[in-house]
Image: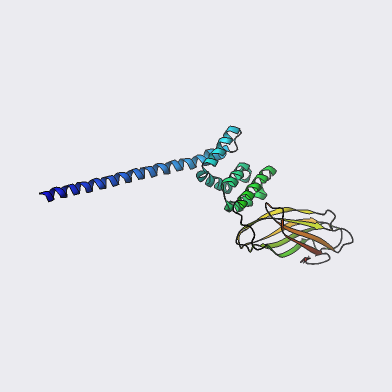
Amino acid sequence: MERKILKKYKNLLYCIKISIILLLSAVSIGASSAYAFFENQARYAFKHSWLPMLIDESPEKRFQAMRAFLNYPDWGLPVLRNSIKSLETENLSWQIGMLIGMLGDQTDVPSLLKLLPKLEDNHQSTVWLGSMQRLYWKNRIPDGPPLKLKGMTINYFGGKLTVENKEKTVDLKFRIENPAYSPRFIRVSAHFWKTSNQENLPSKYFWLPAGGKIESKIHSKFSPVEHTNDVRLDFRIWEVGLNKVLLHETFKIKLNKNSISPNSN
């Protein structure tokens, strides 16, 4: 008799335990579903409300939108990253670049850099460049092997490159290698000497991944001065955020040549 009663209580306790487990599971599933629903609604709000509000005419609304992105980066940052991939260039605001610079990391630099040449507004491009610099210096690893400049060649247009004092059109082709175990964000500048205009070429920015390389060219024009058989080219590489030159090489471009591979001094 006692065994039957004991067995009945054990079965009852077992049923109660199963019921509690099922109840807690239901509560957990309900909470997860509610959070997922709230998260979807938040992402929708960032994409369709807060993002357009960044360029609203009202300063109060712009401030509210900025605060929303800064307070909830887990939801806001993916929306900002997707916006620079999907929006037309003319619809990209400097606020987007600034927020990515504050909330993102180094992996965002190549995406921002790809759009930099397309930004016509000087203020906008300055903000985006500052954001990229900030992201780079967040996790910059100092020192490491120096960069290497390889394969500098000059292609010219319009026939033989002569000493006649006429404007020459050329492409400077080069390859830069980064043997370090960390990426480098660099600025390339070039300058012609022995020319009538002493031309400074516009700077170009590059993202060099760890152990990677880039190949690029700079399109330019110059006019040699009279009574010279060559033109001097100064080529410099700077690390963005520093005034120190990482690499400086000087080349002599011989005139009266059918092809040009400049000699390095």
Quarter of image, res 57: top right
Quarter of image, res 258: bottom right
Q: Position of residue 191 (x, y in %)?
A: 78, 56
From this viewpoint, which residue is outermost toward the front?
2
Quarter of image, res 238: bottom right
Say whether residue 223 is left or right of residue 216.
Answer: right
Q: Position of residue 173 (x, y in %)?
A: 72, 61
The correct choice, above or below, for 204 with respect to 180 in the image is above
Give the tally of numbered discs.
0
Q: Quadrant of the C terminus?
A: bottom right
Identify the residue at image location x=61%, y=45%.
Answer: 97
Q: Is residue 160 visible?
A: no
Residue toward you, 138 or 167: 138
From this viewpoint, which residue is outermost toward the left?
1
From this viewpoint, which residue is outermost toward the right?
227
Q: Is residue 26 visible?
A: yes
Say whether residue 5 is left or right of residue 180.
Answer: left
Give the color scheme: rainbow, by chain, secondary structure or one colour. rainbow
Q: Position of residue 79 (x, y in %)?
A: 53, 45
Say whether residue 189 is left or right of residue 212.
Answer: right
Identify the residue at image location x=74%, y=64%.
Answer: 153
Residue toward you, 238 or 60: 238
